[in-house]
Structures are given as C-alpha cells and as structure tokens.
Amino acid sequence: MKRSRGGAAGRRWRNRFVTLLYPAFVTLLYPVVLYQDEAITVTTSFLKSGGRQYPLAELSLFHRVEHSGWLRPRLYELRARFRGRTVRLFRSYDSEKFGRVCRALVRARERAGLA
C-alpha cells in the first residue's frame, strides 16, 4: 500500500515546488513594465512593438544590427527568432534609446528565468 505525501513531508514537498515556480507565476500573472514609450513596451512576460505582442518565452537568438551610410545617420535594429522566423522587434536612430530597450529586454529575460 502506497503512502500519500501527507503531513509534514507533504508540506515540505509542496513548499519546495511553489518556491521554484512562484517567480514564473508572478511574472505571467502580473507583468512588470520595464520600459515603455510610443514605439515599444518591454515587460517581464512580453514585448510589444509595431502593433504586435511577442511572448518573451517564444523569442530567442537576439541580435543587434547597425546600418550606416555616407549620407544617413546610423540606424540600430533589434532582431530575434520568433516561431521559426527572424523578426525585427525594434529600430531607432537614437543609440541611447536603443540601449535602454536592450537593457530592459535583458532584465525582463532575467526576471522571467529565460537568461
């Protein structure tokens, strides 16, 4: 006859399980906004840009692209893989704004346990 995990042993097991999963549940239920302006919103569970919303868990292989030319200012782009395709998440001519978005994305992935 098998014994159930009742009593103190069961509580210890449940407490360990909840402790491991608690940050993920909080992140999904209550996303924290880490960066927001008119072009992009970065939270602990999703990134919203260009009218589309991307769950952080489905984004991978992030990379930055810089375009420069003789007569044009430097353009910065943030790209990632989303559901098997490369998508442009954000672009800006402002290097400081681009840096803030990238740092917010790093913090969001760390808080979600994806980094």
Image (cartoon, rainbow, N blue to C red):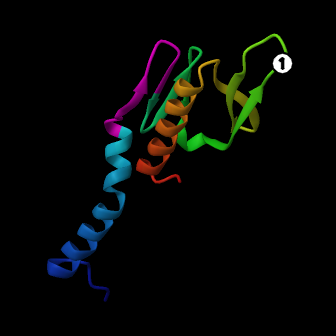
- Residue 7 position in % (x across, y down): 14, 78
Q: Which of the pair 39/85 is nearer the observer?
A: 39
Considering depth in this image, is 64 or 60 the residue closer to the camera? Answer: 64
Image quadrant in which you'd find residue 35? top left
**What residue do we see at 35% from left, 63% from top?**
20
Question: Residue 71 occupies which quadrant of the picture?
Answer: top right
Check disc 1 and give the amino acid type: Gly
**Is 1 drawn above or below residue 108 in the view shown?**
below
The extreme front residue here reads: 70
Left or right of residue 46: residue 98: right
- Seen from the viewer's position, the closer of residues 70 and 115 is 70
Q: Which residues are magenta?
A: 29-41
Residue farthest right in this picture:
70
In x, y percent, where is residue 53? Answer: 54, 24
Residue where numbered disc 1 is placed: 69
Residue 34 highlighted magenta (yes or no): yes
Q: Position of residue 57 (x, y in %)?
A: 55, 44
- Front-most of residues 94 and 19: 94
71 in relation to 113, above or below: above
Indicate whether 38 appears above or below 103: above
Q: Is residue 14 left or right of residue 40?
A: left
- Residue drawn at 21 percent across, 81 percent down: 9
**Residue 14 visible in the current orientation:** yes
